[in-house]
């Protein structure tokens, strides 16, 4: 039997598993990013800004990418796998783009969709789905990252109102958001609040001097006596489990997204190895380079298989277990970083140049490695699931 040549980008032919609708999502997102973002993303990364964000938000809204796996309120209501495929294409261009979509849809919008009142949903979700209102998610604090139950931001009752005081740190979209979902301690435990960012006492100074996720808006949230009506509380959000449920939604997008960054780095390394000549032939013809390319392809496709399986679980009636999300996040980010680092070695000195995407992806993934659950925390979550013993304390 004669076989067709393998597609070097998809040697296992995994994309044959996609439906026509999922291929349309892939192609639409990829084409838009290739045309409108790829020519500029290295410059934005170097300058440490994302000047096109308002336009990008509206365009992503038109494509149905914002809250795309949510039902109603202007959301696309698509499958978890379609959302994952979109995340992969976004992160293949830059992790900052996937972070924006992830925070908008899987954190801020999901929190309102899952835990909000009907009034809150009607007020915010249609505008957020259209990209007309940007949201952020205020959980992490300067001294409380992996242990959000110890947060010091407080919400206290004052008559019928709530008054919020505290600080949040490393908040994507914070400085450009129209609404912030803020988590705070109350007399009854952790609660969530929908905070319009023009409320007196709220500010979101930009965090500068980052060496990772530079083409992304990262901010501190400052809440000094922010007074909100009783209706600002998310009525169905009780306890720290509510924000952690939101984080699981975002982590699922990471499982897919990082395979895009890894794919981009691997393709850059392969193309470079085929063109770069040393000792009279392309470096792709040398055994050690081929070993690197093969090992990178193996890990990339195992990571993609993990993402595909988790998407099937997430789309099933039983759903996906949080520990299974930890499995995917831990494995896929770790392997994506290693793929980028190996790709850098194939490019040699050119690997540190922004003329190629490799070092940008590698730097970005250093943030993805620790946000929304560090390697240590996901390891311990899996350890507890596998042994029945909690080792967090």
Image: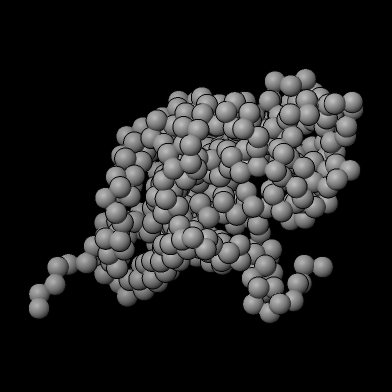
Q: Quadrant of residue 27?
A: top left
Q: Tell me the quadrant of the picture where the C terminus can be found.
A: bottom right
Viewer-side residue, 319 vs 390: 319
In this figure, what is the number of numbered marks? 0
Please state if 143 lies on the left or on the right of 250 as rendered. right
Q: Is residue 179 visible?
A: yes
Q: Quadrant of the N terminus?
A: bottom left
The percent coordinates of residue 217 (x first, y second) are: 59, 34
Q: Residue at x 77, y 55 (%)?
A: 147
Instruction: Tell me where residue 73 appears, x and y as whole percent.
Output: 50, 33
Give residue 308's position: percent from left, percent from top. 41, 62
Above-or-below relation of 393 to 72: below
Q: Is residue 367 left or right of residue 97?
A: right
Could you tell me residue 391's position as x and y percent? 76, 72
Say above or below: 341 vs 219: below
Examine the rendered structure and indicate whether residue 30 appears above or below residue 342.
above
**180 relative to 61 in the view: left or right:** right
What residue sits 23% from the left and 62% below the top?
Answer: 7
């Amino acid at each position: 039997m004669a076989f067709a040549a393998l597609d070097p980008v998809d040697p296992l032919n995994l994309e044959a598993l996609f439906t026509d609708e999922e291929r349309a999502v892939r192609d639409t997102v990829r084409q838009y990013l290739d045309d409108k973002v790829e020519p500029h993303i290295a410059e934005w990364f170097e300058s440490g800004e994302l000047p096109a964000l308002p336009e990008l938000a509206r365009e992503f809204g038109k494509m149905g990418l914002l809250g795309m796996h949510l039902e109603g309120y202007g959301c696309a209501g698509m499958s978890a796998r379609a959302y994952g495929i979109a995340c992969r294409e976004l992160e293949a261009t830059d992790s900052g783009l996937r972070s924006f979509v992830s925070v908008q849809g899987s954190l801020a919008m999901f929190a309102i969709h899952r835990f909000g009142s009907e009034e809150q949903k009607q007020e915010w979700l249609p505008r957020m789905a259209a990209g007309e209102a940007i949201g952020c998610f205020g959980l992490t604090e300067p001294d409380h990252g992996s242990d959000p139950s110890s947060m010091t931001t407080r919400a206290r009752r004052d008559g019928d109102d709530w008054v919020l005081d505290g600080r949040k740190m490393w908040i994507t979209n914070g400085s450009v958001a129209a609404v912030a979902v803020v988590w705070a301690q109350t007399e009854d435990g952790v609660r969530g609040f929908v905070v319009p960012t023009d409320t007196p006492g709220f500010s979101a100074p930009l965090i500068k001097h980052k060496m990772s996720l530079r083409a992304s808006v990262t901010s501190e949230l400052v809440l000094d006596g922010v007074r909100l009506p009783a209706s600002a509380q998310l009525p169905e959000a009780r306890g720290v489990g509510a924000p952690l449920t939101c984080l699981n939604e975002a982590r699922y997008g990471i499982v897919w997204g990082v395979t895009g960054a890894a794919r981009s780095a691997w393709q850059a390394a392969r193309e470079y190895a085929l063109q770069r000549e040393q000792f009279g032939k392309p470096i792709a013809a040398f055994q050690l380079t081929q070993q690197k390319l093969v090992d990178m392809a193996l890990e990339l496709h195992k990571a993609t298989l993990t993402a595909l399986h988790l998407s099937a679980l997430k789309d099933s009636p039983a759903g996906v277990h949080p520990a299974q999300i930890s499995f995917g996040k831990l494995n896929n980010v770790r392997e994506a970083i290693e793929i980028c680092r190996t790709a850098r070695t194939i490019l040699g000195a050119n690997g540190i140049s922004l003329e190629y995407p490799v070092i940008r992806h590698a730097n970005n993934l250093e943030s993805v490695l620790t946000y929304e659950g560090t390697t240590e925390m996901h390891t311990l979550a899996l350890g507890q699931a596998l042994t029945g013993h909690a080792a967090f304390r």
